[in-house]
């Protein structure tokens, strides 16, 4: 585990309420390639982990969600919707009860693109943690294939529309409840569009000073930005602090002995502490 200032320490199980804080993971799981083998390995890793809540993107199919659940039985509570194709490709797993949840699709925006089949949107879930109710928003925004997030770029307008819808959803959550917005937002840390969203929605970036990419660098994209985020809003009269770091950066051993990366994204883990 990293020893950076964002590093995490400690262990937490469902029966242990003596430790403050909640451990959360977000990961874009990559919907192409050897999906079943990678998801089984991911599920096994999650089952052995101490994360309280896991938010996944690009799970895509209901059969994939069932596969993860079978591999990670420690997570008894879950949220996803869709008969064959999952709405938004989003899955939330929790060690703590989920009192209610819903999926809200982002407005359809041009140009026409295959990505629209993913029905991207936001998954809002109220989780009954030992420290009280927490609203978790798991989301995946439209991709920007231009690698350009300037105000004039065609994809920036798409991001603004989707973030505008997300801002409205967050504003509708009562101020007495803390909120964690996590996932692949497909906008870089430090970009103007993300900064405007944070200000308007009243959110704080747990990794605000971290300049590392969350997408795995490749020959075609050697310097990707940080696209995966953990953003928080404290309840009225409380504070919600946290630290975070990256996980699943290295190859893992699949069931057949092959070595493979779990995803083209890194996982982002965070420890959130709620206090009066």
Image: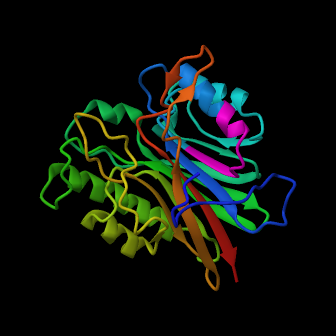
**In this picture, which residue range is highlighted in magenta?**
44-55
Q: Is residue 242 visible?
A: yes
Q: Residue at x 75, y 69 (%)?
A: 20
Q: Quadrant of residue 110?
A: top left
Residue 19 placement, left or right of 120 = right
| Quadrant holding the C terminus | bottom right
Residue 74 placement, left or right of 157 = right
**The magenta stretch spans residue 47:** yes
Q: Residue at x 21, y 49 (%)?
A: 155
Q: Work out which residue is located at the far left of the displayed protein and give it.
A: 152
Query: Can you say whether 69 is above or below 274 in the image?
Result: above
Residue 63 placement, left or right of 114 = right
Q: Residue at x 48, y 62 (%)?
A: 169
On the image, the x and y values in percent for residue 56 come to 54, 42
Q: Residue at x 33, y 45 (%)?
A: 142
On the image, the x and y values in percent for residue 212 come to 37, 55
Query: Can you say whether 62 is above or below 226 in the image?
Result: above
Q: Can residue 83 be seen in this view?
A: no
């Amino acid at each position: 585990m990293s020893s950076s200032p964002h590093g995490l320490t400690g262990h937490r199980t469902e029966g242990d309420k003596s430790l403050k804080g909640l451990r959360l993971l977000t990961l874009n799981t990559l919907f192409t390639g050897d999906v079943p083998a990678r998801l089984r390995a991911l599920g096994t890793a999650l089952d052995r982990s101490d994360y309280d809540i896991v938010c996944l993107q690009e799970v895509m199919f209901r059969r994939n969600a069932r596969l993860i659940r079978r591999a990670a039985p420690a997570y008894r509570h879950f949220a996803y919707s869709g008969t064959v194709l999952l709405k938004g490709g989003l899955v939330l797993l929790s060690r703590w009860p989920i009192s209610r949840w819903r999926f809200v699709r982002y407005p359809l925006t041009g140009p026409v693109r295959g990505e629209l089949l993913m029905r991207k949107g936001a998954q809002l879930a109220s989780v009954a943690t030992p420290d009280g109710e927490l609203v978790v928003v798991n989301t995946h925004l439209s991709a920007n294939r231009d690698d350009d997030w300037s105000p004039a770029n065609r994809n920036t307008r798409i991001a603004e529309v989707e973030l505008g819808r997300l801002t409205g959803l967050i504003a509708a959550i009562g101020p007495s409840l803390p909120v964690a917005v996590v996932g692949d937002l497909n906008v870089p840390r430090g970009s103007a569009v993300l900064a405007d969203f944070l200000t308007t929605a009243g959110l704080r970036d747990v990794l605000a000073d971290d300049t590392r990419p969350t997408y795995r660098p490749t020959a075609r994209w050697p310097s990707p930005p940080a696209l995966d985020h953990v953003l928080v809003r404290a309840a009225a009269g409380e504070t919600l602090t946290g630290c975070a770091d990256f996980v699943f950066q290295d190859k893992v051993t699949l069931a057949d002995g092959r070595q493979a990366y779990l995803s083209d994204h890194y996982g982002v883990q965070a420890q959130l502490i709620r206090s009066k």
